[in-house]
Amino acid sequence: MIDMEVVLENLTKKFPARGRKSQGEVTAVNNFTFKAPDGKLIGLLGPSGCGKSTTLHLISGLLKPTSGRVFFGSDDVTSLAPEHRGIGLVFQNYALYPHLTVRQNILFPLQNLKGKDKLSRPQMEKAAQEAAQLVQIDGLMDRKPGELSGGQQQRVAIARALVKMPKVLLLDEPLSNLDARLRLQTREEIRRIQRQTGITTIFVTHDQEEAMSISDLIVVMKDGIVQQTGRPQEVYDSPVNLFVARFLGTPPINVFNGRVENSKLYIDNTEVMGEVMAKDQEVYVGIRPEGFLLEEEGPLGCQLRSVETMGRDESVVATHKEALSPAIRAIIGVKEELSLKEKQLQEGAEVRFSLIPRKVFLFNKETEERIYFQKGRTS
């Protein structure tokens, strides 16, 4: 098993501005500092254009940083060519050779090894067979890519990346071209393969559910800047700013205009929570969908729009004039859902909620940074 710590130090990448009207440079990655621990799966997560793929290409050596350093273990690889970094790279579009069989595609990286790394034909065949078995395509070795499904092609790409047992495995949006069922299956396979090999893996995605389900650590990015890093559940439970809170979670967090006054939290002049240890100020109030309790005497009144069934979850869809989105969603239990049905409430009827404090987050209206309001913590 190969373990390798990946360290990024103040990594910055700037590109020349495009177009006649553009001036100066565009900063795609801005002062990125992060340590990926040995043998872990790291999810680089953020919206399109946030710099996550650029970061991956800097790690791989496909791009050179404007400033900053990249280390694999104690080795500075910043100036090293990609082929000398000991990486495996899997792209979104698979990049398989259509005229070669699965076996030949997997063998290709081994056939280009030179010097002391060069393998004999039996050694190459053995390595290719082991890589194919690892991703469970050993029965497809004589087929060509055109004869395979999208999921099978992706497995071939992963096997080709793994066949040299790289120090670091880099995956750039590897599931984007798969349908929903295959995405779920393949992400589980990626996690299994990563655990089995112990290879440090960095996985780029814009899909927060994908990243949270298989990553040991996630790095949330916006505009080339790292917003927050940590274990997925920790980041979900304690976002540092409004962007992170909104980006993580399905259904997304509900955001209201509110204010703190005399240690009480108000939404639309209604006290919805007490013992709020923060300064008096206008705030954004973020409430996770699971942070609502449907109660007849609850302080937060909303107008019912509908009740949605999403598989195992029931959601109350409602509106409130201080909500930043047209609809708010509250996940409710079976008993609460039955209670609503018994009342036969119509659209526009009032539904009332109390709030679970640990599912409520406050954010500064100007900076959008988190305001901590638990006892003993003020800001």
Image: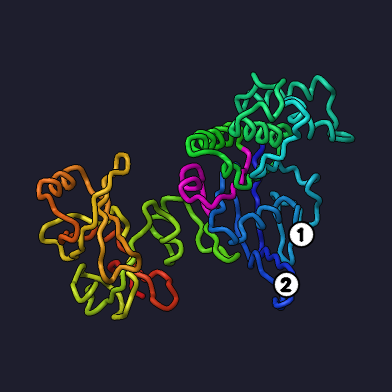
Identify the residue position indicated by label 1 in the image: 64
Residue 48 visible? The answer is yes
Out of 235 and 29, give the one closest to the viewer.
29
Q: Where does residue 218 sit, x and y in percent of width and height?
A: 52, 52
Residue at 54 percent across and 58 percent down: it is 47
Residue type marked 1: Lys
Identify the residue position indicated by label 2 in the image: 19
Which badge, 2 or 1, is on the more N-terminal residue? Answer: 2
Residue at 88 percent across and 35 percent down: it is 114
Out of 164 and 107, give the one closest to the viewer.
107
Residue at 63 percent across and 67 percent down: it is 30
Q: Report if the CB atoms under discs 2 and 1 are less than 8 Å apart.
A: no
Residue type marked 2: Gly
Where is 31 relative to 177, above or below?
below
Pointer 2 local density, CA inside 10 Å: few below 14, some 14–19, many at least 20: few
Q: Where does residue 118 sit, x and y in percent of width and height?
A: 85, 31
Where is 347 relative to 277, above or below?
above
From which residue to which does the magenta span run? 199-219
Q: Is residue 247 left or right of residue 354?
A: right
Where is 129 relative to 65, above or below?
above
